[in-house]
Amino acid sequence: MDYIIYFALTIGILVFIHEFGHFAAAKLSGMRVDVFAIGFGRRLFGWNKKKGFTFGELEKDFDGEGGTDYRLSLLPLGGYVKIAGMVDESFDTKFANKEPEPYEFRSKPMWQKIFVITAGVFMNFMLAWIVFWGGNFFQERAIFNTTTISNVVNGSAADSAGFKTNDKILSINGETVNNWEDLIAKLFIQSLGEDVNLVVERNGTEKTLLIPRSKIPDYESQVDFILPEGSVTSIGQVLDNSPAMTAGLKAGDIFLKINHIPVISRFQVTKIIKSNPQTEIPVSIERGVDTITIAVTPGEDGMIGISITSQFEGDIKYTSYGFFESIYRGLVDIVNYTDLTFNMLGKVFTGKVEFGKAFGGPVKIAQYAAKTADIGISSFLYFLALLSLSLAIINIMPFPVLDGGHLLIIIIEGVTKREIPIKIKIAIQNTGLVILLLLMAFIIYNDILSL
């Protein structure tokens, strides 16, 4: 239920922001806007000046007389603004056999058409920029000031990739690594789909590691791959009347060993506990200045009733920005993420990155929206900003049905001084819509497979 609620909230915000851009630009340009819809398909309910609030569809010959019908439709996968005199997602061509009216899209000059058609993308960029600005201005950025790897267990994925305990990573694919956040971005995101060439400092000497991409797990599981020097695994919360509470474990306890095995990560702790149901196991912890060993017996389900967290106790550098510097940093964030998006798209088309790893549909959006909302409002807003930026980038591409497709038609008509026949525009829209629906079906299929 959380997934459904947060998906509806996320899509609702993004669609409203995008379509409001088109709506406001059309109104400023003197165009009539017949419909402002959240969702596609059958009208569930809505409001307009002529009829007020009504449920269900309006009459087929309904004339709003210049007013807008604000509606919620059945399929919550997007939305649209129906502008008079424009061939769009509604496929309405009743105006085709009439003389252009001054309030119609088709009667306006080229610059106003471009203004209206790009306004949605502009609003999505603005939403991302405002959130990035707020994140830079209101929140300090905690940067883990190290590139040295913590303990590497023999036989682990990190060991198989060639890493050793206390390796200090100096560069990745020829680019210098300055901190742990920089390391994670270069290793798991920027180099996705590529083999990685690392230079590490090991026992005072530099060593080059060439790691095949198959040896590097997805970003989501990187915490079980390598951790920064200074990382500890601790107890976040202890449930009442749980085996952990009975044994005497407390929130804030730091794991040292579990079942005589040195603790490296939270996933390792979970794995050991789950593999010993109803079996007493020793747990060595650090509590304040004391080191304590406690015996705990997992239940039949292989759980002891705790939440496990990873925390960093090394050198942390906090960075904050002023009001105007945050505006600039927000623009830099947009440029960086836009560059990363196009880089990722290039890797998908060249076969370096699997389609399902680069694209996500409703299922993944719902999952990430719920997860980020659980973490906090700032995380949810940041996810919303990234999604808004992605929506803007995809929408401006010159593909039929998308804003970029409409923009291309406007430019062609402006250059040739001739309007493309309505039938051809409808054919282009239909073709684009079919391809888009097939692509969406494939994305949803991949989402379901990844569950």
Image (cartoon, rainbow, N blue to C red):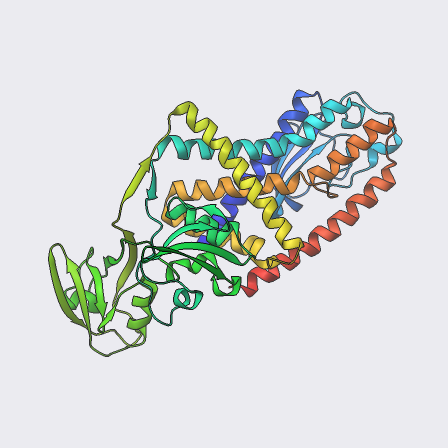
Residue 364 vs 53, above or below: the answer is below
Q: Quadrant of residue 266?
A: bottom left
Is residue 38 shown to the viewer in this render? no
Where does residue 400 sit, x and y in percent of width and height?
75, 43
Q: Residue furthest front?
A: 205
Horizontally, residue 80 falls left or right of residue 234, namely right
Q: Quadrant of residue 416?
A: top right
Q: Residue furthest bottom?
A: 279
Where does residue 139 sit, x and y in percent of width and height?
35, 35
> Viewer-proximal residue, 193 or 417?
193
Residue 377 vs 447, above or below: the answer is above
Q: Residue at x 53, y 52 (%)?
A: 191
Q: Residue at x 70, y 51 (%)?
A: 436
Q: Residue at x 52, y 65 (%)?
A: 214
Q: Residue at x 68, y 42 (%)?
A: 57
Where does residue 33 sit, x and y in percent of width and height?
69, 29
Q: Quadrant of residue 329?
A: top left
Horizontally, residue 386 falls left or right of residue 267, namely right
> Viewer-proximal residue, 325 or 161?
161
Where does residue 347 sit, x and y in percent of width and height?
62, 53
Horizontally, residue 205 falls left or right of residue 438, namely left
Is residue 446 shown to the viewer in this render? yes
Horizontally, residue 15 falls left or right of residue 140, namely right
